[in-house]
Image (cartoon, helix red, strand yellow):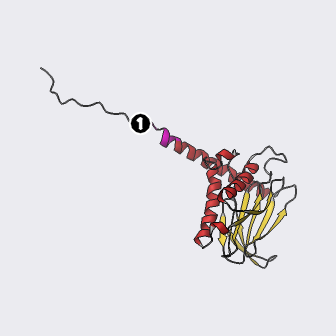
Amino acid sequence: MNRVFDSQFQRDRLILSPGEHAVSEEDVVLYTVLGSCVAVCLRDSIRGISGMNHFMLPMPLPSSKFFSSDAGRFGLQAMELVINGMLKRGATRPRLRAKVFGGGHVLSTGSRADKVPSSNCAFALEYLAAEGIPVLAQDLGGLRARKVSFLARTFEVLVHKLGAHHPPEVIAEERAYRTSLGAETRREHRVSQFLFDEPAPAVAAPVSDRSPRS
């Protein structure tokens, strides 16, 4: 995560890449660029604590698998990291409010054949509903990437949708991120199979203490 000065907002900007999260009590801008990924912006206005993540699921999932699959754990981890980070600074779960953005179909060459963005959106909304965290605003889906600027002090979020021709660096970053998630999911699945499918060790035959007859 990089920290630079934002001349537009006249304050520091924390730039999140895919897989990162940030928690802050400062008057900063939490910023990211989203394609098919999703960002959840969270705020405890009483304690003045804000958080943001940037994540995706490695493959499409039905809602029944969101919280019980190897792929779903990437979303769970992204949410738990930012929420737990806020709680450690004094936020409380009942006071959390959320805004959700992203899930654009930018890796599917203009079609909606890619189901991962829809799964990302559905996962974020279902997780927040399950945790009882109200969603105050959302801008999800569509065919365009988004620049998201979250003003941590005020909970104002500015979304700028990019043109139909997505920046190559956004596409390359998202493809690399999804590929790495898929590889990690397959690796951990193989480890799980090895641990739980390993055959039981052979039991040695009992040794008789009788002396052989002559």
- Residue 8, percent from left and from top: 82, 76
Q: Main secondary structure of the magenta part?
A: helix
Residue 194 forms part of the magenta stretch = yes
Q: In the image, 154: left or right of 111?
A: left
In the rendered image, residue 164, in percent from the top left (x then y), is placed at: 87, 55
As drawn, is 142 to the left or to the right of 182? right
Asked where in the image residue 52 lies, by quadrant, the reply is bottom right
Q: Position of residue 103 (x, y in %)?
A: 77, 54
Q: Which residue is mark 1?
A: 200
Q: Residue at x 57, y 46 (%)?
A: 187
Q: Position of residue 41 (x, y in %)?
A: 72, 65
Up/down of 202 relative to 13, above or below: above
Q: Quadrant of residue 135?
A: bottom right
- The verdict on residue 180 being magenta is no
Q: In the image shown, does 162 or 118 lie closer to the viewer?
A: 118
Which picture quadrant has residue 137?
Answer: bottom right
Badge 1 marks a residue whose secondary structure is: loop
What range of the chain is rendered magenta?
193-200
Quarter holding the N terminus? bottom right
Tell me the residue at 60%/47% (across/down): 68
